Image (cartoon, rainbow, N blue to C red):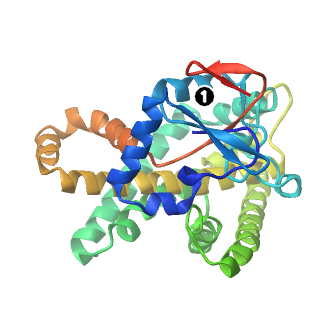
Amino acid sequence: MLLNAGSSGGSPADPGFWALPARVRAEVFARLRDREGLAWVPERGGGWYAVARHADVMVASRRPDLFLSGPGVTTPPPARWVRWLFGDSMVNLDDPRHAVLRRIVSRSFTPRLLARVERDTVEIAARIVSAVERERPVDFVSAVAAPLPFEVICSMMGVPRVQRERVLALVTAASEHTGVRRPVAARLRSPARGLRALAEMRRIIVALGRERRRRPGEDLVSALVSAEVDGRSLSGRELGAFFSLLLVAGVETTRNALAHGLWLLTEHPGQRERLCADLEGGLPGAVEEIVRFSSPIIQFRRAVAVDCELGGQLSL
């Protein structure tokens, strides 16, 4: 987690840092933890705190009164005009706005919907595994790790199958340069390309929302457009922001975890044999450990609201 106290940057936030050997990166974070897990990284015009100790990350995550998401959890935070045009993602909101949206969304996840999602997930996974056995692809990410979460989310949302290929291309365009070092020309082009992709994704889901208001189905979009809390329902912009968050964040994080999980089990055959010997009993713990060890999201920002202490040090 990065605690923003000015402009963003610094070596752990530099894509080049993540190209270093794993041993070197581990040594950097070990040094951070030895310094009570909190290190100030100065930059021109400000700087930020790098928080590397689990206990401190948990404190910052559970104290929204002290550590705000509102300025934006990504690096860099979204520009004001982007937020005005596309609406605010839930991850960039604080209470009370976040609480209202959370209640509306959570009300949509009924037991009936979750049961259908579980059935669809089993069916999609079985279909992907059958294709792998039949076609023997060499790229696990493109054959398994990416399509599984994408198909599950599209099925859950009720995105028509004829639109999914286009939606997948838009998700790729919106996130393909995240955390990647690229030439100056590409950096200038990619924001516009990503924003166009987000705009089209939201146009698709807003149109689907209007259709589901007229003819509701058993999907999440139907539930979202009909859910109300204290007379408040999701606007078209809020529905679009939620769809983008679910697709971009949901696909990317699950893809990363699945890919890292395969690599870890390949690198540690003893652990793989232990898991396969008791798949039902060992899988829940294996999933938690893979997510912990691989860290599908490598950083989140928080803005410090007031002077406070974290890790025994003063945060400003």
Looking at the picture, how far across and down is residue 289, in whole percent?
A: 32, 37
| Numbered-mark total | 1
Looking at the picture, how far across and down is residue 303, in whole percent?
A: 73, 35
Q: Left or right? Give the position of 198 relative to 237.
A: left
Q: Left or right? Give the position of 219 relative to 270.
A: right
Reply above or below: 99 against 183: above
* Residue on which the image places disc 1: 61
Q: Left or right? Give the position of 215 relative to 56.
A: right
Q: Quadrant of the C terminus?
A: top right
Q: Residue at x 84, y 25 (%)?
A: 230
Foreground: 45 or 298?
Answer: 45
Residue at disc 1, secondary structure: helix
Reply above or below: 260 against 293: below
Q: Residues within 10 Å of mark 1 (few under 14, many from 20)?
A: some
Amino acid type of the residue that numbered disc 1 sits on in the rendered structure: Ser
In the figure, residue 314 lies in which quadrant?
Answer: top right
Looking at the picture, how far across and down is residue 28, in whole percent?
A: 43, 45
Looking at the picture, how far across and down is residue 287, in whole percent?
A: 33, 40
Q: Quadrant of the N terminus?
A: top right
Q: Left or right? Give the position of 220 relative to 251.
A: right
Q: Residue at x 48, y 54 (%)?
A: 152
Reply above or below: 177 against 244: below
